[in-house]
Image: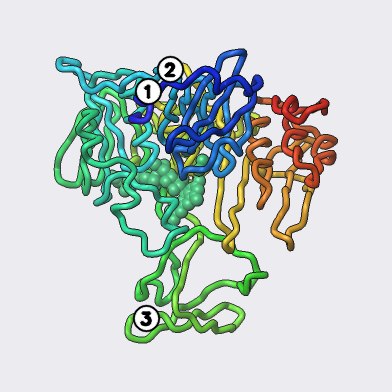
Amino acid sequence: MPSRLSVFRLKGSLFLSVCDRRMKEVEIGHHSVLLTRHEGKYSALGNQCTHYGAPLSQGVVSGNRVRCPWHGSCFNICTGDLEEFPGIDSLPCHKVQIGEMASSAVPGVAHTILLLGGGIASLMCAETLRQEKFGGRIIMVSRDHLLPYDKTRLSKVMNVESDTIVLRRMEFYHQYDIEVWLRKEVLSVDTDRKTVAFDDGLVQNYDQLLISTGCRAKALDVPGHSVYPSFLLFLQMLSEHNIKFYMNDIVTEIKGVNGKVKEVVLKSGKVIPTDVLIVGIGSIPNSAFLQGTKIQMNPKKLVIVDKYMRTNVPDVFCAGDLATFPLAMAKNQLVNIGHWQMAQAQGSLATYPPFTLLTCCFYSDVIALFFCLCAGYGEGYTELVMKGNIQAHKFLALYLKNDEVIAAAGLNFDPAVSAVAERLSSGKVITKKEAQYVRLSSYNYPYSILGAVRKEHPAQMLLP
Ligand SMILES: Cc1cc2nc3c(=O)[nH]c(=O)nc-3n(C[C@H](O)[C@H](O)[C@H](O)COP(=O)(O)OP(=O)(O)OC[C@H]3O[C@@H](n4cnc5c(N)ncnc54)[C@H](O)[C@@H]3O)c2cc1C
Ligand code: FES
């Protein structure tokens, strides 16, 4: 929201060397500015992605947007508007003022939207409501002690200070009249009366309800599991980095001395000396408080929603890790995707019934110090087309089903995965033949994924 307010004028001559659908990075004063041209119209945007600051000039342009090379945020190249998460702000648009100032509550508007959960899905919902000039009351309730924070940092940065990962400060919530109730747990929901009961005895009514209470980490259920402190992470490591895998085995016991873990015992009889135990065995939906309501859940206790993030009960929405939703690029199969960018997109959409979820899943992780990117939805893939070399830590893997690319994973080949994401989110198919054609030796490899037909100049191949 705040960055949309930035206005800055540049001299027209700076744009002269920018061709249509191309980008150019220039330094102006101390600012890195991204010059773009689309259908003859020029724009000057901030060049730094609003997520973690990647240079957007190294991303991929497709249609009227640029996709960040690091984690896939998309921005409108005419306006700087954020079109795909995980960035949370739009880009400064230096040429013209296009963004609208977010509103706050309007006195006398008696409409309450209650957001259950203080994660990214709720935050994006609250912000979108204000951006869309919703003038009623917004209440976000969380059992956390902390304001919404960047959870993804927890598994990437050691000893992170909570203060440094908070996404918005309290002043922000005050400024936009978003009530945040922390340390308050939802106990039950009554969809007939349109009320929610909390652990402190309070019963709050709502006009519309968003449930985005996410999931919590599953704990090991073996002797000793509760005695020792452990970090619960979702990480995969590469065995070549001195990480040993014990496959087809089961943890049966955790042994320790004076409250400190010492050994982990496996079913096979192996005993592993251990100083720190990290458990990554999946998650459990935070949906117990919905038991007995009319809200439909699947056998895993995930809430079923339609493409507008609506549950089967009127005025009740669900978004984020707790939702199972029809994924357009998987032929509307109901899926649950526990990703940051997906939770952002869903939270934002839940307030926007006319719009449907078309975002391409985009995921990044740091694996043994390498930055790995994934896009699409690879479940059920039957074939893999590999480019590059895993040992050399430089590769692109294209996952195929029915002779079409459904997902991609890449290491050190930016912006190839972004290019695939762009193509998939535009609804266009990448055929097996195209996948096999991609050459990683050529500097224009991503463009050959984007454009089915090779043309003379790589810049002309930017389009899906
Ligand atoms: C360590 C870690 C690293 C991750 N790294 C990545 C990554 O690199 N990339 C990526 O894409 N994704 C990553 N994820 C996943 C990503 O963080 C989630 O997909 C995202 O946070 C989901 O957002 P959400 O709003 O749906 O739920 P959550 O962030 O889980 O928020 C749920 C909120 O609901 C609250 N709540 C739950 N139950 C109740 C209740 N009964 N009453 C009141 N409040 C309640 C919780 O306290 C919390 O505030 C990571 C997750 C973890 C845990
Ligand atoms: S730095 Fe651009 S999406 Fe993360």
Indicate the amino acid at tag 2.
Val
Quadrant including the N terminus: top left
* Distance from the alpha carbon under mark 1 to that under mark 2: 7 Å
Residue 203 badge: none
Give me the disc on residue 7: 1
Q: Position of residue 309 (x, y in %)?
A: 45, 28
User: How many neighbours does mark 1 have within 10 angstroms: few (below 14), some (14-19), or many (20 or more)?
Assistant: some
> Does the CB distance between marks 3 and 2 fall below 8 Å?
no
Of residues 451 and 304, the one nearer the viewer is: 451
Local crowd size for mark 2, using a 10 Å CA cut-off: few (<14), some (14–19), many (≥20): some
The local secondary structure at tag 3 comes to strand
Of labels 3 and 2, the one closer to you: 2
Above or below: residue 462 compared with residue 219? above
- Asked whether the viewer can see residue 414, the reply is yes
Report the mark closest to the observer, 1 or 3.
Answer: 1
Taking 441 as reference, is 91 left or right?
A: left
User: If you read the primary sequence from the N terminus, does the residue marked by circle 1 or circle 2 appear first?
Assistant: 1
Residue 299, given in percent of the width and then of the height, sits at: 49, 44
Callout 1: CB less than 8 Å from ligand 2: no
Q: How many marks?
A: 3
Give the mark nearer the N terminus: 3 vs 2.
2
Cα distance between the residues tagged 1 and 3:
56 Å
The three-letter code of the residue at mark 3 reads: Lys
Circles 1 and 2 in contact, beta carbons < 8 Å: yes
Measured from the top left, where is residue 212 in percent x and y?
37, 39
Residue lying at 45% horizontally and 79% vertically, measured from the top left: 275
Name the residue beneath numbered marker 3. Answer: 260
Q: Position of residue 247 (x, y in %)?
A: 65, 70
Residue hosting label 2 = 96
